[in-house]
Image (cartoon, rainbow, N blue to C red):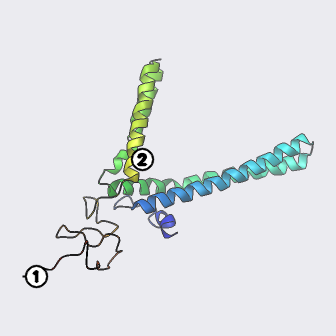
Amino acid sequence: MEFMFMPFRRYAEFSGRSRRMEYWMWTLFIFVVYLVFVVLGVALGATAILGASQGSSGGTAAGAGGAIIVFALFGIFLLAIFLPSLAVAVRRLHDTDHSGWWILAPMIGSVIQVAGGAMHSQVVALVGGLVGLVIGVLLLVWYFSDGTAGANRFGPDPKGRGGPGGYDQGYGQGYGQQPAQGYGAPQQNSW
C-alpha cells in the first residue's frame, strides 16, 4: 500500500530512481480508480437511459447529471495524476539506467503517422504506427526489467544493492540493514 501512493509524495520529482513495485502499484491504483469511475458512469448513464425509455424526466435528469459529475471528477483525477505518473515513469527509466527522455520516443511514430496522413500515404502512416508500437514495447520491457544493481548515473539503488567494493550488500535486505552471513555477504579472509 505504501508503494501505491509514493508517487503522490514524490509528486513532480523527476530525479532519482523508482523500483518496479512503486511503478506497478501506481499503475494498479490508477487502473482501479479508472474502473470505479467507469462503473459509476455506466450505472448513472444507464439510469438516464432507462428513465428516458420509461418517460420519466426526473430519472433522466438525475442520471445524466450524475454521469456528468462522475466524468468531471474523472477529468480532475486525470489532471491530478498527470505529473506523478510522468515522474514515476521517468524515475522507473532511470532505475534501468535509461534517460527519462525515452518517455517521449513513442511520439516519433505519431509524427511519422501524421506525415503519412499529410502525404496521403498509407504505407508511411503504417510505418509510423509500427515504429510507435516497437518503441512502446521497448518501454514496457524496460518497465518490467529489474533496475541496475548499485548506484548508476541517476542515483543510488532504491533496493540498497551493491556497494563500494562491487559486491552485493544484501539483495532484498532492506534499507540500512546488514546482510546475513552467507550468499551475498562479504566474505572474511581466513589467512
Vertical side of 109 occupied by 13: above or below? below
Which residue is identified by label 2? 140
Q: Where is residue 185 in the image (x, y as percent from the top left)?
A: 24, 75
Q: Position of residue 190 (x, y in %)?
A: 10, 82
| Residue under the image location 45 percent in, 62 percent down | 22
Of the image marks 1 and 2, the number of the one nearer the N terminus: 2
Query: In the image, is 22 to the left or to the right of 71?
Result: left
Query: In the image, is 36 to the left or to the right of 104?
Result: right
Q: What element carries label 2?
A: helix
Question: Looking at the rendered structure, which numbered label has been put on residue 190?
Answer: 1
C-alpha separation, residue under disc 1 versus residue under disc 2: 46 Å
- Tell me if I can see residue 115 in this picture: no
**What is the three-letter code of the residue carrying label 1?**
Ser
Query: In the image, is 71 to the left or to the right of 89?
Result: right
Quarter of the picture containing the C terminus is: bottom left
Identify the image quadrant of residue 105.
Answer: top left
Among all residues in the image, which is located at the extreme bottom? 191
> Dots 1 and 2: beta carbons under 8 Å?
no
**What is the three-letter code of the residue carrying label 2?**
Leu
